[in-house]
Image (cartoon, grey):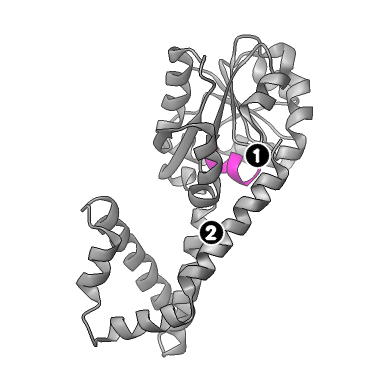
């Protein structure tokens, strides 16, 4: 299957990195910034001079541009995408909006995260109710190369945008705080980072692979009156959970304010 990628920003390039790691190089790439196209070329992908050139021979198109330029990008390729699959990564751009812009294309929305670069993303996929099964299968198979895929309704995809889409930044933010704390008690930064990232990886496996609940992991580590219990008491006194919930709510409000 031939792919086209329109938009080679942070997420678009991460998708290309993952496809490269998976050995899938049959992708034509266009971005208005030629330096980004050159980066894609360095990975082995086909550089194009225009979006129309990129999509002409493609069976499926990944549209990875900012919401503000979705309409312009679609106008440029609309008549080259009849009966083709258009996969949009644009946050807050609804299926109905995409269909109005690309009435003769099959449209789906996806929300991966930047872990696609390591083939470790969780990608949410939403589609219109009348989408043909073979079209959905094609979209799912593309993103299965880049990690796990969950097919959800559009409302859940939008909610998940501020969880799994933004999630790597939250985890990195927490890791940054953990490293800073480790340095404050005398560990060097390199060791602190290694300890923090490997600990996060191990905890994730307990939750995702061993099937432990969050409470089971906490209880297995935090014995009453112990060191970990003291640390958690301090975090609770600082209302960390409430602050985190508020942060996610604010991100979701922002998404709703730009939805089109």
Q: Is residue 160 left or right of residue 64?
A: left
Q: Bin the neighbour count of mark 2 within 10 Å (Cα to Cα): few under 14, some 14-19, many 20 and up.
A: some
The residue drawn where x is 39% and y is 77% is 191
The residue drawn where x is 53% and y is 69% is 243
Q: Secondary structure at mark 2?
A: helix
Q: Which residue is mark 1?
A: 92
The question of residue 15 being in magenta is answered with yes
Q: Position of residue 158 (x, y in %)?
A: 56, 41
Mark seen at residue 144: none
The question of residue 133 being in magenta is answered with no
Q: Secondary structure at mark 1?
A: loop
Q: Is residue 91 visible?
A: yes
Give how far apart the Cα atoms at labels 2 and 1 are.
19 Å
Is label 2 or label 1 in front? 1
Give above or below for 165 relative to 229. above
Q: Bin the neighbour count of mark 1 within 10 Å (Cα to Cα): few under 14, some 14-19, many 20 and up.
A: many
Give above or below for 99 relative to 118. above
Residue range in magenta is: 9-16
Q: Main secondary structure of the magenta part?
A: helix
Q: Quadrant of the C terminus?
A: top right
The residue drawn where x is 44% and y is 44% is 121
Task: Decide which of tag 2 and tag 1 comes sooner along the chain.
Answer: 1
The residue drawn where x is 64% and y is 31% is 94
Nearest the camera: 23 or 249? 249
Q: Which residue is mark 2?
A: 169
Q: Is residue 71 left or right of residue 246?
A: right
Q: Position of residue 230 (x, y in %)?
A: 33, 86
């Amino acid at each position: 299957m031939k792919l086209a990628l329109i938009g080679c920003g942070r997420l678009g390039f991460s998708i290309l990195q993952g496809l490269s790691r998976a050995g899938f190089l049959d992708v034509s790439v266009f971005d208005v910034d030629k330096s980004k196209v050159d980066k894609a070329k360095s990975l082995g992908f086909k550089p194009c001079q225009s979006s129309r050139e990129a999509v002409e021979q493609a069976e499926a198109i990944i549209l990875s541009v900012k919401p503000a330029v979705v309409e312009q990008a679609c106008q440029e390729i609309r008549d080259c995408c009849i009966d083709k699959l258009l996969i949009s990564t644009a946050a807050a751009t609804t299926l109905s909006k995409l269909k109005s812009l690309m009435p003769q294309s099959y449209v789906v929305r996806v929300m991966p995260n930047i872990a696609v670069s390591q083939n470790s993303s969780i990608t949410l996929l939403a589609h219109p109710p009348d989408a043909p099964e073979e079209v959905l299968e094609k979209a799912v198979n593309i993103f299965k190369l880049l990690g796990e895929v969950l097919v959800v309704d559009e409302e859940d995809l939008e909610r998940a945008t501020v969880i799994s889409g933004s999630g790597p930044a939250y985890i990195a933010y927490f890791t940054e705080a953990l490293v800073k704390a480790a340095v404050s008690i005398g560990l060097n930064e390199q060791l602190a980072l290694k300890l923090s990232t490997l600990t996060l990886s191990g905890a994730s496996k307990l939750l995702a692979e061993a099937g432990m609940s969050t409470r089971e992991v906490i209880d297995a580590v935090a014995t009453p009156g112990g060191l970990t219990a003291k640390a958690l008491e301090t975090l609770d006194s600082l209302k960390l959970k409430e602050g985190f919930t508020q942060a996610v709510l604010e991100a979701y409000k922002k998404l709703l304010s730009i939805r089109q």
